[in-house]
Image (cartoon, helix red, strand yellow):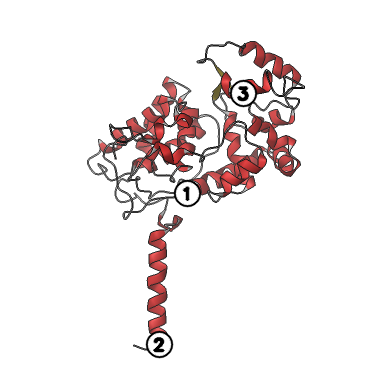
Amino acid sequence: MGRLNLILVWSLSLTLSLYNLHPTSAQLSPNHYANVCPNLETIVRQVVTTKFQQTFVTVPATLRLFFHDCFVQGCDASVLVASTGNNQAEKDHPDNLSLAGDGFDTVIKAKAAVDAVPQCRNKVSCADILALATRDVIVLSGGPSYTVELGRFDGLVSRASDVNGRLPHPTFDLNQLNSLFAANGLTQTDMIALSGAHTLGFSHCSKFANRIYNFNGQTPVDPSLNKQYAIQLQQMCPRNVDPRIAINMDPTTPRRFDNVYYQNLQQGKGLFTSDQILFTDQRSRNTVNSFASNANVFNSNFIAAMTKLGRVGIKTARNGKIRTDCSVL
């Protein structure tokens, strides 16, 4: 074999080994199940629509579940796994205890419907079903539709300890947000677009109580908070409020996926510090203004960011599997 051929073979084998160590989005395709389970998207959509008709919580619960899954060990459905006697799973980490059960239920029911079709049984990953269900709840709440890349395998591990430091907190500033998202290959613009998911859903009072009662020694209320909005939040969240009480993230259109979240930020009506900082920090304000003034610009950036998010840490047949039960490794 000639020297050139040897170099080419060595180069190819190195590329393949690197690919197996660091799987990329190359394995993902919208047509991954075209021959295996051709009606997959219709089956999942029907289940998600039924669940949506039963409770609107399905929307923010599923969307948040996808985000929390992808940011910890990648988009591999590891957040769906139940703890066992000898393993505390991701879902039981303190940062995940507020994930609403309706998100888990949506994926479990969609998986059951898919596996009820003999051709599809045990062929479709829980990770892909979660990705599809997330797109479907966005559409059902008035958001943009987009093509979902498929071909993820389900993860082989789920450890609560892996969640530490992987998820954004309500008190984060722009540097902390950018650092966390960059670790997942996402830009500041991606981060701001994905933050727009806070146009839906709710939060418990404890997550932002510091902004309305004890911001600092000089002022109890965060000065970046709209004064009228702060009064409303104090009325809805008195000091000794029932910890189960939840407040809409978007006070204007809480049940519609839209760009009003960014318009709220312009008015000082971001619920979390990590929301309002996107407008108060000069480095991100222009993007907020752009998304606030043009829904199409926001939608296109959101779709791009969701597609990139869906490629984070994906598993292959070498380091993943197709789970028969999404809650069991």
Q: Is residue 38 above or below residue 280?
A: below
Query: Measured from the top left, where is residue 285 in percent x and y?
Result: 73, 40
Labels 3, 2: front one: 3
- Count neighbours of disc 3 (C-alpha within 10 A) and say few if under 14, some if 14 to 19, many if 20 or more: some
Q: Considering the numbered disc 2 on the image, is that residue within a helix, a strand or a loop?
A: helix
Cα separation between marks 2 and 1: 38 Å
Query: At x 48% / y 31%, what residue is drawn?
Result: 95
Look at mark 1 in the image and give the residue it sits on: 312
State if disc 2 and disc 3 touch (CB < 8 Å): no
Residue pointed to by mark 3: 208
Please give the residue where the numbered disc 2 appears in the rendered image: 3
Does residue 149 lie above or below 239 as drawn? below
**Above or below 23: residue 12:** below
Return the residue nearer the eye: 80 or 248.
80
Q: Earlier in the sequence, mark 2 or mark 1?
A: 2
Q: Position of residue 126 (x, y in %)?
A: 35, 40
- Image quadrant containing the C terminus: top left
Q: Position of residue 248 (x, y in %)?
A: 58, 21
Left or right? Give the position of 25 relative to 231: left
